Image (cartoon, rainbow, N blue to C red):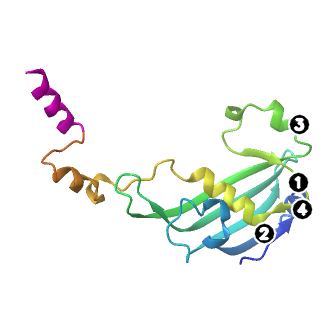
Amino acid sequence: MSEQIVIDAPAFARDAKTLRGKIAVADLHRLQEILGARGTFVDYVLSGKIDSYGKPFLHLVIEGRLQLQCQRCLGSLDFPLTLKSTLELAPDGSELDTMAADEREDADVIPADKGIAVVSLVEEEILLALPIAPRHAPSACDAPLAFALHGTDHPMSALAALKGKLTK
């Protein structure tokens, strides 16, 4: 079990602190349904800063390898993970309501909580970065072999052939 680290985000940014760590994939509970192997780790570096306008930011870098399930062949898919996130801290959450999502392309805005769990923050960023339907490249996927058993290149071609026989 990874150590639960909680930071005071505004103070962390104001003091320009940096935190480095390693999290066991098994401790990322919200990811368990979509991950294959759980014996791996992700590394993170979290740093804080105040920009030239006095706004507090957190920078998060996450690296590791995850085992996902290919949605085409259902086999194991090695997914290299390299994320870099810039998170602006909104002091009272008011900026979250007034700022349109597309107004800030360089940073996401999150509440400036005094109790942010680092593991939860890392897990949330990973969840946001994962593909909705992970798949191998077509040349690396075993799924086309299943269609070859029926002598077709496409799963619907067998249905089209049957439809053609029925309409004659």
In this view, the residue in front, 15 or 135, is: 135
Q: Position of residue 5 (x, y in %)?
A: 81, 71
Amino acid type at circle 2 is Thr
Q: Tell me, for residue 94, which label it has, or none.
A: 3
Quadrant that contains the C terminus: top left
Amino acid type at circle 1 is Asp
Task: Look at the magenta stretch and give its main secondary structure.
Answer: helix
Residue appearing at x 73%, y 59% in the figure: 121
In this view, the residue in front, 158 or 10, is: 158
Task: Work out whether 149 lies above or below 42.
Answer: above
Alpha carbons under labels 1 and 4: distance apart: 7 Å
**Which mark is in front, 2 or 3?**
3
Residue appearing at x 71%, y 45% in the figure: 107
Amino acid type at circle 3 is Ser
Dot placed on the residue nearer the N-terminal end, 1 or 3 = 3
User: Do labels 2 and 1 touch, CB within 8 Å?
Assistant: no
Dot placed on the residue nearer the N-terminal end, 1 or 4 = 4
